[in-house]
């Protein structure tokens, strides 16, 4: 090997190493917490995490060039982690008035309208006074905004469960009377669990629970990190990528 080639190889190796250091310094591993919530976060057939919101999050990370370390867990645990630990990204989280000052909001991804749902065989109509439902057994996810709403409205039989799938299972085996969900969520969940959606009856819309599903960072996160992701989300909006993902999932 000639001296010139050795010198060139050494220079090339150093250059690649410096480039790798530069990239590593800019690229960070970000801890992300979420739950299974059809069709926003779903488990694919190969065990990986998919869904509409997951695709949006991955598109966001393609822009920032960071590496997501995504953890799927019950919502109560995910919410607790994002509430108290720094630099935690959480999705899909309802952007409510009560939560507004508790997180840094990166971007809104889907508007939601929530309804009470029951089994059709038990309900002759679909419009009830809220006061008439207060003694019904209702399943909700622990630490969800739905759970907080029921508590605030003094519902007397609230079952706070680990996840939304358990809520639907409880409904179909007549352990509870009602659950709370959006139209698209309950349709997708019924299909994935093998239930007949046509057996369900949509009751009152709960306008107080209507919200926007969002992506957020924990409140004690780095300001620079928050600004970086807010800017990246704006890029998803302006380049039309968010709209394309919505069209793919038929979430208009």
Image: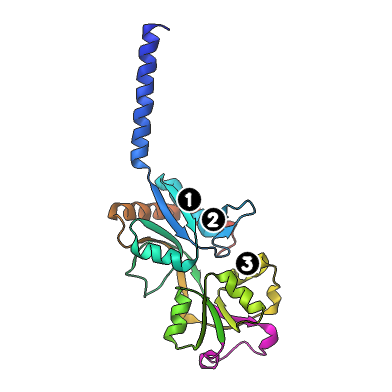
Tag of residue 4 = none
| Residue at (36, 65) in percent of width and height | 83
Q: Quadrant of residue 237?
A: bottom left
What count of labels does the image hold? 3
Q: Which residue is mark 3?
A: 188
Q: Quadrant of the C terminus?
A: bottom right
Q: Is residue 240 left or right of residue 11?
A: right
User: Which circle, 2 or 3, is nearer the viewer?
Assistant: 3
Q: Which mark is residue 59?
A: 1
State the residue position of label 2: 245
Pointer 1 and pointer 2: residues touching (CB < 8 Å)? yes
- Disc 1: CA contacts within 10 A as few (<14), some (14-19) or many (>=20): some
Q: Is residue 58 left or right of residue 26?
A: right
Q: Circle 2 sits in a helix, a strand or a loop, which is it? A: helix
Residue 33 at x, y percent in the picture: 45, 59
The N terminus lies in quadrant: top left
Image: magenta residue range: 114-136
């Amino acid at each position: 090997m000639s001296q010139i080639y050795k010198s060139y190889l050494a220079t090339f190796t150093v250059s690649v190493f410096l480039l790798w250091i530069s990239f590593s310094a800019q690229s960070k591993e970000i801890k992300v917490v979420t739950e299974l919530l059809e069709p926003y976060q779903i488990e694919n057939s190969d065990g990986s995490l998919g869904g509409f919101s997951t695709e949006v999050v991955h598109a966001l990370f393609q822009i920032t060039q960071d590496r997501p370390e995504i953890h799927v867990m019950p919502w109560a645990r995910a919410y607790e982690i994002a509430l108290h630990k720094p630099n935690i990204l959480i999705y899909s989280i309802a952007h409510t008035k009560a939560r507004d000052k508790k997180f840094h909001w990166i971007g809104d991804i889907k508007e939601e309208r929530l309804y009470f749902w029951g089994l059709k065989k038990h309900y002759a109509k679909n419009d009830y006074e809220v006061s008439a439902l207060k003694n019904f057994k209702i399943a909700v996810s622990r630490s969800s905004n739905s759970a907080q709403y029921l508590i605030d409205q003094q519902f007397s039989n609230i079952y706070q469960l680990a996840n939304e799938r358990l809520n639907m299972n409880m409904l179909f085996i007549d352990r509870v009377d009602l659950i709370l969900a959006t139209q698209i969520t309950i349709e997708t969940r019924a299909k994935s669990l093998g239930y007949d959606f046509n057996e369900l009856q949509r009751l009152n819309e709960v306008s107080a629970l209507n919200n926007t599903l969002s992506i957020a960072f924990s409140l004690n996160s780095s300001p620079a990190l928050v600004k970086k992701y807010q800017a990246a989300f704006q890029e998803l909006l302006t380049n039309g990528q968010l709209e394309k993902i919505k069209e793919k999932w038929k979430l208009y």
